[in-house]
């Protein structure tokens, strides 16, 4: 069975939130990145899990080393920007199938990431963008930062993507396909205090399962790219 490598993007400045390192912002008492890490770890189609950290997120790196020892490999990138860091990353590691998630999506679950991975692996396109209907985003009281019109309907990029890292590293423009998902789990990115309140409310309503305890195995050596 083909699988993907999971990548959590956790190196941004988090300037919109204004509360230190955003991956460590507490959502219902737990660092936000723990929810994404748990989802990645529970996804059956995710082979290995990596997290990018930068000079902007040293405490996030320390947390991952302590709480997710042996289950997440840290990769250091320059911290120039989300897109730039991702390009820098794929140019170095060249994984054939990468599932990318930002660290600010605490509602994600392993089964939902498996859905994305399966769609990408069977779709045949080198790039997949997961989008949610604009009407769903606004109905939750969230304000989107980007709106895309696809087939005459407005959608918002969720932040979850999949790509062929080998083809991406070649520098050519990748042919995209879209996975349209009308699920709240993909609609919430925590960028503001309002987003945080929405995430906490939804997590409470959904009865979020207990996060797995951290492993005790040694942390894999970080990659400095």
Image (cartoon, rainbow, N blue to C red):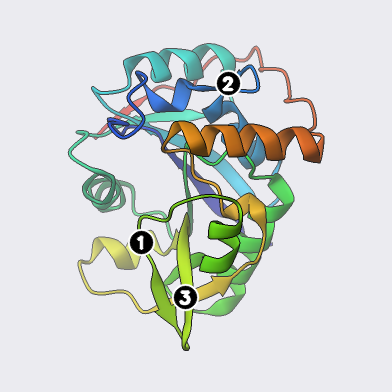
- Hey, which quadrant is residue 3 in on the image? bottom right
Residue placed furthest toward the bottom: 151
* Cα gap from disc 1 to disc 3, whole angstroms: 10 Å
Crowding at label 2, few (<14), some or many (≥20) Cα neighbours within 10 Å? many
Seen in the image, is 18 located left or right of residue 40? left
Q: Earlier in the sequence, mark 2 or mark 3?
A: 2
Secondary element at tag 3: strand
Rendered image: mark on residue 154? 3
Q: Earlier in the sequence, mark 1 or mark 2?
A: 2
* Residue lying at 61% horizontally and 41% vertically, measured from the top left: 40
Please state the horizontal and vertical placement of residue 82, each as a whole percent of the image: 28, 45
* Cα gap from disc 2 to disc 3, whole angstroms: 38 Å
The mark closer to the camera, 1 or 2, is: 1
Please state the horizontal and vertical placement of residue 145, each as a whole percent of the image: 36, 55
Q: Which residue is mark 1?
A: 146
Camera-nearest residue between 130 and 51 = 130
* Residue lying at 39% horizontally and 67% vertically, measured from the top left: 147
* Residue lying at 27% horizontally and 31% vertically, measured from the top left: 15
Crowding at label 3, few (<14), some or many (≥20) Cα neighbours within 10 Å? some
Residue 15 drawn above or below residue 25? below
Camera-nearest residue between 138 and 175 = 138
Q: Quadrant of the C terminus?
A: top left
Seen in the image, is 41 located left or right of residue 188? right
Q: Which residue is mark 2?
A: 68
């Amino acid at each position: 069975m083909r699988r993907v490598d999971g990548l959590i993007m956790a190196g941004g400045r988090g300037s919109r939130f204004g509360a230190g390192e955003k991956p460590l912002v507490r959502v219902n008492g737990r660092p936000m990145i723990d929810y994404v890490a748990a989802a990645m770890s529970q996804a059956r189609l995710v082979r290995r899990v990596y997290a990018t950290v930068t000079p902007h997120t040293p405490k996030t790196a320390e947390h991952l080393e302590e709480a997710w020892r042996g289950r997440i490999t840290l990769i250091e990138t320059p911290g120039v920007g989300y897109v730039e860091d991702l390009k820098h990353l794929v140019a170095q590691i060249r994984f054939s199938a990468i599932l990318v998630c930002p660290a600010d999506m605490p509602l994600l679950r392993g089964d939902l990431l498996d859905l994305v991975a399966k769609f990408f692996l069977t779709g045949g396109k080198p790039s997949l963008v997961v989008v949610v209907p604009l009407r769903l985003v606004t109905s939750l009281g969230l304000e989107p930062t980007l709106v895309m019109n696809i087939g005459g309907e407005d959608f918002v990029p969720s932040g979850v993507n999949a790509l062929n890292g080998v083809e991406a590293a070649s520098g050519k423009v990748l042919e995209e396909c879209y996975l349209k998902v009308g699920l709240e789990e993909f609609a919430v990115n925590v960028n503001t205090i309002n987003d945080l309140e929405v995430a906490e409310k939804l997590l409470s309503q959904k009865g979020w399962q207990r996060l797995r305890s951290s492993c005790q195995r040694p942390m894999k050596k970080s990659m400095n790219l």
